[in-house]
């Protein structure tokens, strides 16, 4: 019993000392403070501001009217009325349009062939050509969607005039021209905005990258100067290293919660990114996520013997982490082993849960598998980080 009380006293002292020393070094070391606190806040502001327009508007395109009839001009006016694109200029032929496209004056070309109006009058189905920059998917989608939507309405108008000319009532002609009326409802992202889709995932990646970098730089610094052994001389066992690891993680958790509060309460509302849930629920979900990142960073100290090693190792992991979350490319299309491997990285479950809570309004009970998985990762990395700290202290 006396030994147990001694352990509790020693552990409490080490836990408090670890919190105090970690906070002291975070604010004293400019590189750590900048990479963790300043970068996390500034980058979240910057990224959200960059994508705050949500959707592309008035994308410049060129048109080639080889038919030069009232119907071809009407189709071009309808395309120009679409908010997604704007006709920059009209060209005599495709060669001129190609030159403007090569100079990046326009991002797409719509061409109406000769005989377009005549084919419509004969009841035939003429075609129009759309040339879009497929190397940039947003440009390609914007030009193609605007043209297809306009062509659909144009076809309906032609069919409406044709049936009306046969002596049918306007309502009957409209029903025959459009026998099926589709109603599209965009769930969770009504404007189909790119920022609403991307920013929540990016914010989660920012947390992982900045926290891992800060933990790595500070841990590498302490290993260089052999400071850990000096601060904790009597804690070279697993149970002795455990309170040290937990104390360090508590400091990072407190600072990360403050940064998260700024993001949820200021950054996202300021730029129109929805937060469809209570901020406290969101912060409760993020607790195991942040802790698992810190513990994983402490595990990586096995490979970080200098402060520069952290930057070299961690900064290049952000892009693969984005890919593995399944937002840039569906997980069902990934190799199975890679999909399984992705779940040992906190951002995979963290991004899914964060998006579900903030964008879909899910409760913690709804996404309980994600939350339980995060706590499982947290415990796993806690044990591994305690063994790592024990190895370093010995």
Image: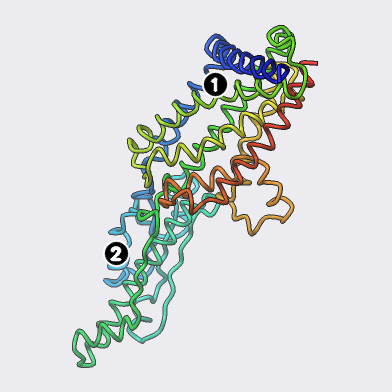
Give the crowd class for mark 1: few <14, some 14-19, many >=20 residues within 10 Å.
Answer: many
Left or right: 322 with respect to 389? left
Left or right: 320 with respect to 264? right
Residue contact at pointers 1 and 2, CB within 8 angstroms: no
Q: Where is residue 115? Give x, y as percent.
A: 39, 76
The image quadrant of residue 13 is: top right
Q: Which residue is mark 2?
A: 78
Quarter the C terminus occupies: top right
User: Nearest the camera: 188 or 390?
Assistant: 390
**Element marked by disc 2:** helix
User: Nearest the camera: 61 or 183?
Assistant: 183
Which residue: 44% across, 26% down?
Answer: 258
User: Nearest the camera: 74 or 21?
Assistant: 21
Q: Is residue 51 above or below residue 117?
A: above
Q: Which residue is mark 1?
A: 251
Q: Residue furthest bottom?
A: 167
Q: Where is residue 333? Give x, y as percent.
A: 65, 58
User: Nearest the camera: 219 or 66?
Assistant: 219
Quarter the N terminus occupies: top right
Q: Where is residue 282? Give x, y as percent.
A: 44, 40
Which residue: 66% across, 46% down?
Answer: 343
The image quadrant of residue 82 is: bottom left
Left or right: 257 with respect to 225? left
Which residue: 62% across, 55% down?
Answer: 331
Q: Nearer the viewer, mark 1 or mark 2?
A: 1
């Amino acid at each position: 019993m006396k030994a147990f009380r001694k352990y509790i006293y020693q552990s409490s002292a080490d836990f408090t000392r670890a919190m105090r020393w970690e906070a002291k070094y975070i604010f004293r070391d400019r590189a750590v403070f900048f990479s963790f606190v300043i970068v996390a806040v500034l980058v979240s502001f910057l990224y959200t501001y960059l994508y705050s327009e949500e959707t592309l508007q008035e994308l410049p395109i060129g048109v080639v009217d080889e038919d030069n009839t009232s119907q071809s001009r009407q189709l071009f006016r309808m395309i120009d009325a679409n908010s997604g694109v704007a006709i920059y200029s009209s060209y005599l032929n495709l060669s001129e349009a190609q030159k403007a496209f090569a100079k990046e004056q326009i991002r797409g070309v719509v061409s109406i062939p000769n005989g377009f109006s005549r084919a419509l009058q004969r009841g035939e189905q003429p075609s129009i050509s759309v040339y879009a920059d497929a190397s940039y998917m947003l440009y390609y989608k914007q030009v193609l969607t605007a043209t297809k939507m306009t062509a659909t309405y144009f076809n309906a108008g032609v069919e409406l005039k044709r049936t009306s000319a046969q002596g049918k009532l306007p309502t009957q002609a409209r029903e025959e021209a459009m026998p099926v009326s589709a109603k599209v409802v965009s769930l969770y992202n009504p404007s189909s905005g790119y920022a609403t889709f991307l920013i929540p995932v990016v914010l989660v990646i920012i947390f992982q990258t900045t926290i891992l970098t800060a933990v790595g730089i500070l841990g590498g610094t302490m290993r260089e100067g052999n400071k850990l052994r000096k601060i904790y001389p009597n804690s070279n066992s697993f149970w002795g290293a455990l309170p040290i690891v937990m104390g360090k993680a508590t400091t990072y958790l407190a600072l990360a919660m403050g940064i998260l509060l700024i993001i949820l309460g200021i950054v996202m509302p300021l730029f129109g990114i929805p937060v469809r849930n209570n901020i406290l629920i969101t912060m409760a979900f993020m607790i195991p996520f942040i802790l698992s990142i810190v513990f994983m960073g402490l595990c990586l100290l096995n490979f970080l013997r200098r402060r520069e090693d952290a930057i070299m190792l961690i900064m290049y992991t952000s892009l693969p982490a984005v890919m593995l979350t399944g937002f840039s490319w569906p997980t069902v299309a990934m190799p199975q082993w890679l999909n399984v491997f992705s779940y040992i990285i906190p951002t995979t479950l963290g991004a899914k849960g964060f998006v579900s809570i903030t964008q879909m309004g899910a409760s913690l009970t709804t996404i309980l598998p994600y939350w339980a998985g995060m706590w499982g990762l947290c415990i796993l990395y806690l044990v591994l980080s305690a063994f790592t700290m024990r190895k370093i202290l010995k």
